[in-house]
Amino acid sequence: MNTLLNIALPKGRLGERVYAMLAEAGFPCPSVLEDGRRLTFENEEAGVRYFWAKPSDVPIYVERGVADAGVAGKDILEEYTPDVYELLDLGVGKCRMAVAAKRDFIDRPERTLRVATKFPNIAGRYYAGRGRNIDVIRLSGSIELAPVLGLSDVIVDIVETGATLRENGLTVIDEILPLSARLIVNKSAFRFKNEPIRTLSARLGARIREREEQA
């Protein structure tokens, strides 16, 4: 039986920050930081095997059991609702999912609202909860462009500082939910590798509390 914890990390700056937290918590694997094209790394002494994955793919690897655990943004978890356990808010990658529009926007309830977004499920649930009829326009590029050019009335997107919105004459008109990176685990792995998973979560939680106390 494979006793190593297989952990999926999101490629990019977020994954690098999360790996630093894991290393500080007692789960290092120095080869992760080496330049090259390798995607999998392991440290038998620490009991872990890491691999890099596209952020939106991490929950798939975890749900399917290829990874025992992984780190994914709350936006991805809310959009795709994978069948996994969410164990811990890592407190990094903080931002928010919000509705934004041009500064002079006036919502007219008698009209179908045109909503441009990369997150149709989040947008759909949000407006369904308000009984609002919408036309979802799914985009994958610069969402801010849609209301500027008249393609949509509003956008639903991730907002960090709001600088891009301001530069394009847009403003946040409502906040949907706060976002941050979360530790997720496969449900079967949580049963059969419960002790190492709980140890991982507990050590990470301790590191998060230490950082908060030092801030």
Image: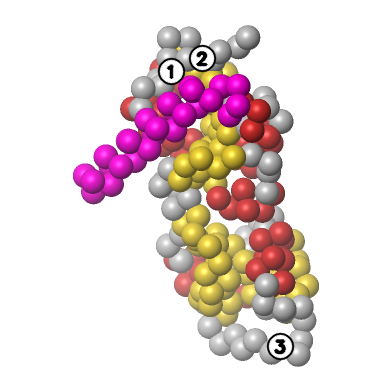
Closer-to-camera residue (136/127): 127
Q: Residues within 10 Å of mark 1 (few under 14, many from 20)?
A: many
For the point 53% across and 83% down, the residue is: 103
Q: Is there CB contact under 8 Å for labels 1 and 2?
A: yes
Closer-to-camera residue (111/22): 22
Q: Residues within 10 Å of mark 2 (few under 14, many from 20)?
A: many
Name the quarter where the N terminus is drawn.
top right
Q: Cα distance, mark 1 to mark 3? A: 55 Å
Q: Quadrant of residue 29?
A: top left
Looking at the rendered structure, the secondary structure element under dot 3 is loop
Q: Cα distance, mark 2 to mark 3? A: 55 Å
Residue type at the position of mark 3: Pro
Q: Quadrant of residue 69?
A: top right
Q: Which stretch did the figure color magenta?
A: 190-215
Judging by the rendered image, the residue that carries numbered circle 2 is 42
Q: Does 16 appear above or below 102?
A: above
105 in the magenta segment: no
Residue 88 at x, y percent in the picture: 47, 42
Q: Residues within 10 Å of mark 3 (few under 14, many from 20)?
A: few
Q: Cα distance, mark 1 to mark 2? A: 6 Å
